[in-house]
Amino acid sequence: MEEILAQLNRVRGIGGSLLVSADGLPMASALRSGTDENDLSATVGELLGAAGRLTQHLGLGSTTLFNAVSDQGGLLLVSTGPAFIVLLIDAGANLALVQIEAKPLIERLATRLAL
Amino acid sequence: METEIERLRKKVENFPSASLYNRLAELARQAGDEIQAETVCRRCIKEFPRSGQAYVILAEIKSAQNKKAEAIHLLLQGIEKDPRSYAAHRLMADLSDNRDQALHHLRQILGFKPNDPATVQRITELGGAVPTGSTTARHRVVAPSGTATGSSSGLQAAIQRPNVVPRPPPALDFAAPLPFPASTHPSPHEPRSVRAATSPPAGTVTTMLRSIGGPKTAVLDALCMEAGVRGACMVDRLGRVMMAKNLPAGQDELLAALSADILKAATATLVSHAAGAPATWVLVAGSGQVLTFSRDHSVSVVVLADPGIRPAMLELRARQALIDLGAA
């Protein structure tokens, strides 16, 4: 798992990656020093909870992808079935390109998790 | 009565809705439990801020307790939420010391309930002219200053001379409600507390525009005309709906409130790795997606769209809507 996350971090624009359960529990991580795995997992868990409430109340099904972008960076959450991959996006990164380049690695991770 | 109240209380706990809260408040009030009625009304206002009925019930309670200024303040809020509330206009007419104000509210009733015998009788008692053939008045809505929906010269005159009741041509006599500022203009004889209570509350314009579908809702038109867009709303930083388009009643508030939750959580996550509050976020789910675009983190456009819709064009439209709102 960590190996795939490390490969994800080599994609241009990605500044760290984390695998969390839908409850926000950390499963694996490859984060830059200074980023606390537990803090990030907890806030992502809260975010997933809020997203789940919205999709449930509006009857939209389950969350498959979430992204949030600010001037100083961004965040990309991708569902891999039982878990979510959290990608920390650097400021000014091309989000579309990041998604395209990260896709095969995310699929590999999803396959690994499904086993 | 007790059983009905208990049944409603359980139902409200499980399936809260404004109508259930109002019914429960009415029953509690009829049973003489004003404290519970007030609690239920306040909870309804908190959970369903668009509902005007709770304000009116609360105003009736305050009026019965001789808290007139408080009742008037609540009634104004109730009328703001629901400009066609019979009970609110009627009670306002009863509570108004100012005859012109009372007549104004009674004439408002005839705008949506033409020839109502009780209202006609009250107007006669007050010595006012009873309008005839008030059907066209249905299309007129009392609007805040500067956003008048009518264009009669009487209305314009009232805006320019807020103390003067306009005397429009006979054909429009019934259809010339005073604009909002005139109806609440304090009389020099009114106590200070009543003057303060009758002043339009802050945020009146946006809320009023939302409830009457005022001209500014047009800023969402282009966005909602994009293929795949189910509806959109404009939301402030606290998750309150400023305006909405093509979203079913209730769904706009739900979308706004839950979007605010997501924004809060996303901000916390981004801040934890030294990025600021997001200007844009997109949530994609199996059968739909929610996209939010904000400006200065104070106002956001929240869009509910079909899955697969590309966000780039929607962002363009949403940003234009935010600019239009700022420029308007």
Image (spheres, rainbow, N blue to C red):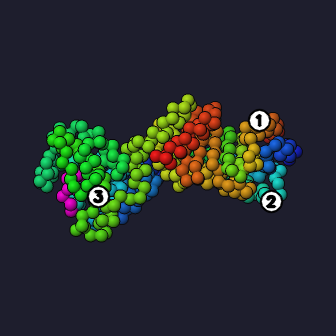
Marked residue chain, label 1: A
* CA gap, disc 1 and disc 2: 27 Å
**Pointers 3 and 1 within a single chain:** no
Q: Quadrant of the N terminus of chain B?
A: bottom left
Q: Residue B273 carries which label?
A: none
- Residue shown at the point (81%, 53%) measured from the top left: A31
* Along the line of sight, the residue nearer the viewer: B26 or B312: B312
The stretch of residues the image draws in magenta is: B97-106
Specify the farthest residue to the bottom: B192
Which residue: 20% across, 41% down? B172
Q: Which chain carries label 2?
A: A
Query: x and y percent of residue B314 in the render?
Result: 59, 37
- Residue at label 2? A34
Name the residue furthest top. B227
Vertical order, B125 against B189 (above or below): above
Instruction: Let me know if marks 3 and 2 both belong to one chain.
Output: no
For residue B257, say whether it is visible. no
Question: Which label sits in the foreground, 3 or 1?
Answer: 3
Helix, strand or loop for disc 1: helix
Name the residue that disc number 1 marks: A100
Under mark 3, the amino acid is Thr
Would you place residue A29 above or below residue B65 in this image? above
Left or right of A35 in this view: B197? left
Pick the front one: B172 or B225: B172
